[in-house]
Amino acid sequence: MGGEVMEPSRLETLFRYYAALGFERLAVRLPERKGRGRRRGKELSLDELRRRIGDCRRCRLSEKRKRLVFGEGDPDARLLFVGEAPGEEEDRQGRPFVGKAGELLNRLIEKMGFKREEVYIANTVKCRPPGNRKPLEDEIRTCMPFLERQIEIIAPAVIMTLGDVATRALLGDVGSISRVRGKTFSYRGIPLVPTFHPSYLLRNPKSKWLTWSDAQVVLGLLSGKRGG
């Protein structure tokens, strides 16, 4: 057989033949699917990045945090959400968006036709700011290389930033979130669409329809990049 690639029908016939001879299993090495190999490579790169971050003490946010929140999801995701910073529940669990704002984000993800594990979720900084304050500029600068590397590894088709902190971190001062939400920008060649942070929507539920409108823009961009 050597390096011959066999059709599935021929393989089935071969397996039936060996089964008739009494073999219950065969040592067969199947070629790895291209997409699966790519995902595995990205997963290993993210693992290496996480090891490089280690028990980070690079800025003052490490002083009171309980757990560093790296990010989670499909390493080969086509859609990447970037939020602001971990909150109390995220700090406790070490996972992004698992509090009340996370529940709202989960509903948005599902409404967009995805499962949470099919997208990737990260934050601008990976440690909780004291009292849930916004991260300071020097804290963002310290943590940004890690977010930038995550984006480089995942190479999503579209990025959706959640709130003004994440939007400014990736785009610079493009204006208030109310003015730029729903518009399409570019981050290093990747389409980026800002929207409100879920915590804002918890306080202002009447704005949920605006975020859904922004999600439609994202879905339109994704549908135009099916082959990506």
Image: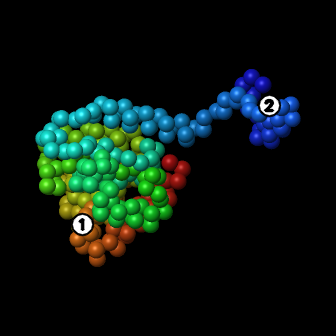
Report which residue position mark 1 lands on.
200
Q: Amino acid at mark 1?
A: Tyr
Q: Quadrant of residue 149?
A: top left
Q: What is the x, y in percent for residue 197?
A: 27, 62
Q: Is residue 218 visible?
A: yes
Residue 63's label in the rendered image is none
Q: Is residue 112 above or below residue 158?
A: below
Report which residue position mark 2 lands on.
23
Q: Is residue 51 above or below residue 86?
A: above
What is the number of callouts on the image? 2
Is 117 positioned to the left or the right of 198 in the image? right
Q: What is the x, y in percent for residue 177?
A: 23, 63
The reply to whether dot 2 and dot 1 touch (C-beta < 8 Å) is no
| Residue at x-position 22% and y-position 58% | 164
- Lower sequence index among marks 2 and 1: 2
Q: What is the x, y in percent for residue 102?
A: 33, 60
Q: Quick one: label 1, few (<14), some, or many (20+) residues within 10 Å?
A: some
| Residue at x-position 60% and y-position 35% | 32
Q: Quadrant of residue 25?
A: top right
| In this view, the mark in front (2 or 1) | 2
Q: Is residue 20 above or below residue 157?
A: above
| Residue at x-position 22% and y-position 44% | 66
Q: CA distance from mark 2 to mark 1?
A: 62 Å
Q: What is the x, y in percent for residue 166?
A: 25, 53
